[in-house]
Image (cartoon, rainbow, N blue to C red):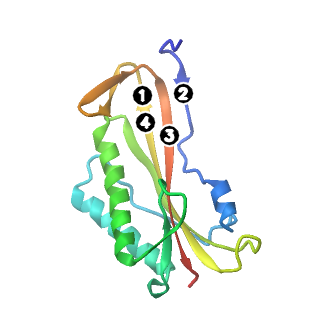
């Protein structure tokens, strides 16, 4: 049984889903570009969060030609789905709003430790003969937990943690389109 004295530690670093990237024709350790994104914090205003989302959207479109169309991979879907610029903007706004909500809904031990965009070229010929650009938007949130710190379970319910240490989570949002 858990005794409340265990320590859980992870390094605060953004991680890649290497299997996913290789499966889609990308060499994970060879990004064409890596862009650090302004981090969202608990003290950010909703206007700042929208501004960060708009900056991400503009950066995505500097690497993808808008006239040729592109695809998006949402975590709850198994396949890529074709999208237009409006849907992409809405999805990026929703991503930033969800991250902001996660930071605000939990106690002060939760914070964003990384927010980065990496741009890859699909170069592995055994995956596809089409040449595409794949964009991986990575977000990392850490939670520093100690005895008796509260966290929100949803529906107005709060729980208290007996775990000590640091837990980190990296999320991914993928967009791909024809290479510029």
Mark 2–mark 1 CB contact (< 8 Å): yes
Query: Real-space Cα distance between discs 2 and 1?
Result: 9 Å
User: Element under label 2?
Assistant: strand
Residue on which disc 3 sits = 168
Look at the numbered discs 4 and 1 and tell me whether their residues touch, using CB distance below 8 Å.
yes
Q: As displayed, is residue 155 above or below residue 119?
A: above
Query: In this rendering, would 169 be left or right of 57?
Result: right
Is disc 4 surrounded by few (<14), some (14 to 19) or many (20+) residues within 10 Å?
some
Q: CA distance from mark 4 to mark 2?
A: 11 Å
Circle 1 crowding by C-alpha within 10 Å: few under 14, some 14–19, many from 20 = many
Q: Residues within 10 Å of mark 2 (few under 14, many from 20)?
A: few
**Residue at the far bottom in the pictured view:** 67
> Residue 8 got which mark?
2
Give the labeled residue for mark 1: 145
Mark 3 and 4 residues: CB-CB less than 8 Å, in contact? Answer: yes
| In-front residue for pair 128/161 | 128
Circle 3 crowding by C-alpha within 10 Å: few under 14, some 14–19, many from 20: some
Give the mark nearer the N terminus: 3 vs 4.
4
Label 1 secondary element: strand
Cα separation between marks 3 and 4: 6 Å
- Displayed quadrant of residue 95: bottom left
């Amino acid at each position: 049984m858990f005794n409340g004295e265990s320590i859980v530690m992870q390094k605060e670093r953004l991680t890649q889903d290497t299997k996913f990237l290789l499966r889609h024709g990308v060499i994970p350790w060879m990004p064409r570009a890596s862009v650090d994104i302004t981090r969202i914090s608990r003290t950010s205003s909703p206007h700042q969060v929208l501004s960060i989302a708009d900056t991400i959207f503009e950066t995505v479109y500097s690497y993808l030609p808008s006239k040729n169309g592109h695809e998006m991979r949402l975590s709850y879907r198994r396949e890529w789905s074709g999208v237009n610029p409006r849907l992409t903007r809405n999805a990026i706004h929703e991503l930033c709003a969800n991250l902001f909500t996660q930071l605000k809904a939990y106690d002060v031990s939760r914070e964003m430790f990384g927010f980065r965009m990496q741009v890859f070229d699909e170069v592995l010929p055994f995956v596809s003969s089409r040449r595409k650009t794949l964009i991986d938007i990575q977000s990392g949130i850490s939670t520093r937990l100690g005895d008796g710190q509260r966290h929100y379970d949803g529906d107005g319910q709060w729980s208290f943690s007996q775990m000590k240490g640091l837990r980190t989570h990296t999320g991914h949002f993928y967009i791909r389109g024809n290479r510029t």
